[in-house]
Image (cartoon, rainbow, N blue to C red):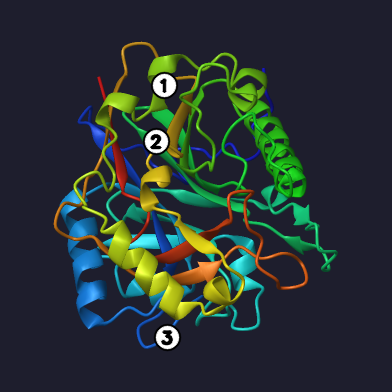
Amino acid sequence: MRGFHFVLPCLLVPTVCFAEPFTVASWNIANLGAPGSELRGFDRDANDYTRIREIISSIDADVIAFQEIGSVAALEAVLPDGYSFRFETRCYENAQKCAADADDIYNAIAIRDTFAHRFFQIDELAVPHQNECGAPARPVRGGVGVYLSVDGRRYLVPSIHLKATCKNNSVEPGTEDDCATQREQVRRLRAWMDAQDDEATIILAGDFNRQLLEGADNIRAEFFPNVPQGHILPGAETRACWSSFAFDFARLGEEAMANNPQFEAEGLRPWLYTPRSSAEIDFFVVENLAEGVTLTADQIELTGDYVFRDPGAALTRCDGSLQPFADGKVLTFAEAYPSDHCPIVMTVSE
């Protein structure tokens, strides 16, 4: 029997006593700052916030895990009425106490007010990360989640965002520090999962920065060996994020050259990083699902909403110089709206 960190009696967290399905969603909204701010280069106008709010409303989920949110003000600008929410601890400890943007991004979790619930933190996921450039170590994203009980079944739903640049078993030069941090996050996450009540279903929701659907993935094999294929969702067949968008690479390449004069000065060319690579790293990982409970999940393709603009920010070395590949191309980034990620949604039902 795993020891449950916070077993709460029904008097404190009443059960939602009906067998209707409930839904969980997750969305990394890519550097979402408060209205009027420009968080990490992302400049959204009033229409952007309105559209993001409409998308969240249309998903109509009971629990929503968010990643890359800059502050309480940012989340309040897009979250429909009728939800309570909580950020990870790091946000409440920053210079703005999470009320306003502080040039960083955080995990958050929201739940419909009609559900009795308790929030919890997984602070141990905020692993100190030392990058290859020798900068002072700083904590990566911690976890924050919600406990709820539906039809007598207990659920723990944490919002997760693991370290980036280590999507599969290949450890590319310069990413060794990222892969080590990601692995340590997953090790601590696994320890947290093992400490929970055997009767509770755990639904990890978020941006894993890992292609867990690859059968040979060593993170999946080592830390989630008992999670069936059908409990790592959405499946590949439902993933179409950004597939409807036609990238004009010739035009984007010209814009990147104009936006970054270093390319021409050094005889280099941009290699554009597109959001399609983010289609396979957002997941629900469900462990200890009760018999008779079924899961259906999808990734929401935001056809007609995509904007990809202002390419030019490029991969650099620690000294600030461009870091080209052997073919003379440099990994180059642009702003992707409403996000480089698409929402995922899962229905839990009997």
Residue behind mark 1: 231
**Image location (x, y in percent) of residue 87:** 52, 62
Residue at x 56% of width, y 64% of height: 268
Q: Residue furthest front?
A: 267
Looking at the image, tell me whether mark 1 or mark 2 is earlier in sequence order.
Answer: 2
Viewer-proximal residue among 253 and 16: 253
Give the SS element for disc 1. helix
Viewer-proximal residue among 279 and 192: 279
Between marks 2 and 3 in the image, the one whose residue lies nearer the viewer: 3
| Mark 3 Cα shell of 10 Å, populated few (<14), some (14-19), many (≥20) | some
Residue behind mark 3: 37
Residue 237: quadrant of the picture = top left
Per the model, the C-alpha gap separating discs 2 and 3 is 38 Å
**Image location (x, y in percent) of residue 23:** 27, 39
Residue 311: quadrant of the picture = bottom left
Looking at the image, tell me whether mark 1 or mark 3 is earlier in sequence order.
Answer: 3
Residue behind mark 2: 149
Circle 2: residue type: Ser
Relative to 294, is 147 above or below? below
Q: Residue furthest bottom?
A: 36
Relative to 345, is 225 above or below? above
Looking at the image, tell me whether mark 2 or mark 3 is earlier in sequence order.
Answer: 3
Residue at x 59% of width, y 32% of height: 168
Between marks 1 and 3 in the image, the one whose residue lies nearer the viewer: 3
**Image location (x, y in percent) of residue 255:** 37, 73
